[in-house]
Image: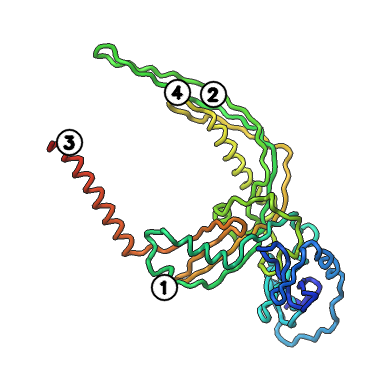
Amino acid sequence: MPKPNHPEIIEYKCPCCGGIVEFDPGSQLMKCPFCDTTFDPVALQEKDDVLNAEQSDGMQWQAQAEAWTDEDSEELDLYSCKSCGGEIIAGKTTGATHCPFCGNPVVLVSRFAGGLKPDCVIPFQLTKEDAKQKLREFMKGKRLLPRLFSKENHIDEVKGVYVPFWLFQADADTEANFHATRTRMWRVGNVEHTETSHYRLERRGTFHFENVPVDGSSQMEDTLMESLEPFDVSQAKDFQTAYLSGYYADKYDVTAEETMERANERIKKTAMETIRGTVSGYGSVSTESTSIQLENQKNRYALYPIWLLNTTYHGKSYHFAMNGQTGKMVGNMPTGRKEYWLWYLLYASVSSGIAWLILYLLYVR
């Protein structure tokens, strides 16, 4: 089993009372939950550097239990909590977590060292209570939702996670050729005439793309993360590990190179939709060819704030995610059988009534 490693853990302690301070979304400051003292996250930067230089104790005992296999060691690391000494088992992508024994938030600083260090982070703007309230609001107005769902379900877990993203920037020289038609119809006596004109349209333009996000975690579905957009990157801060205190965080396990294809898809789709929008006034338009050439490509590594909520209803789990900056909520919910048939019969009745009214107006009157 991997040996506990003290220097790689950071705990931010309050100099007034010794409590563990966390990042507070409301004030955008580090805050002690015991004495309410606040600190600027930037002022704690020096602790990131000092702790890396600490030397761990040489007090190892010879293990008598069965050793972990190489496969186990490759997937997990073991750390010791500086507050209570409890063992913290972390996956290879875990960057911030909580001690399972004393609950104190810890940051595994080595996960963000060197080439793994993020360029920026968007701090949480909304709290755990905000996430719970947004979930209640999200359930309102869902006509097919079982009436008892919001009452009987309970929130099993609410977890604030910093998810790794790659942000891409580039200039896109774009060309597209379209085939368009216009049709004109007229009648001379009993003869109807149709004239179809064909056009070849060329469009060219250069688009500047900035901060195109692609999820850098294999544990998060790309479509789920994209459904939480947009994020306001103008509010991003230079990365400080202090922002991670009190939350969970993952480092990327999907490299920038591996996400470039997805970034290209998003860039191309947006560029083509914009160019296609300049073609109007035709009866039909079809795309013949397209071409995009990228220049001045750059990418950055960022952490985005996301609340993950898990609920249970009749023994089945339902998962929700919320943008920790804007409050946008997405997730899956059950469909009540009684509610479904109620709205189906109502819809069928209304449709049938409208059909009979049309028949009456057409044939009876």
In percent of width and height, residue 41 lies at: 76, 63
Measured in 3D between alpha carbons, the distance from the residue under mark 1 to the one under mark 4, in whole angstroms, is: 57 Å
Viewer-side residue, 137 vs 278: 137
Q: Secondary structure at mark 3?
A: helix
Residue found 86% across the figure and 69% down from its top = 50
Q: Quadrant of the N terminus?
A: bottom right
Q: Which residue is mark 3?
A: 362
Measured in 3D between alpha carbons, the distance from the residue under mark 2 to the one under mark 4, in whole angstroms, is: 10 Å
Q: Which residue is mark 1?
A: 314
Disc on the earlier residue, 3 or 4: 4
Q: Which residue is mark 4?
A: 181
Disc on the earlier residue, 3 or 2: 2
- Give the amino acid at mark 2: Leu
Disc on the earlier residue, 1 or 4: 4
Judged left or right of residue 277, residue 119 is: right
- Label 3 or label 4, whichever lies nearer to me, is 3
Q: Secondary structure at mark 4?
A: strand
Q: Residue 131's image quarter?
A: bottom right
- Label 2 or label 1, whichever lies nearer to me, is 1
Judged left or right of residue 190, residue 6 is: right
Number of residues whose C-alpha sits closer than 10 Å to that of mark 2, classed few (under 14), some (14–19) or many (20 or more) = some
Residue found 87% across the figure and 75% down from its top = 55
Number of residues whose C-alpha sits closer than 10 Å to that of mark 4, classed few (under 14), some (14–19) or many (20 or more) = some
Measured in 3D between alpha carbons, the distance from the residue under mark 3 to the one under mark 4, in whole angstroms, is: 37 Å
Measured in 3D between alpha carbons, the distance from the residue under mark 2 to the one under mark 1, in whole angstroms, is: 58 Å
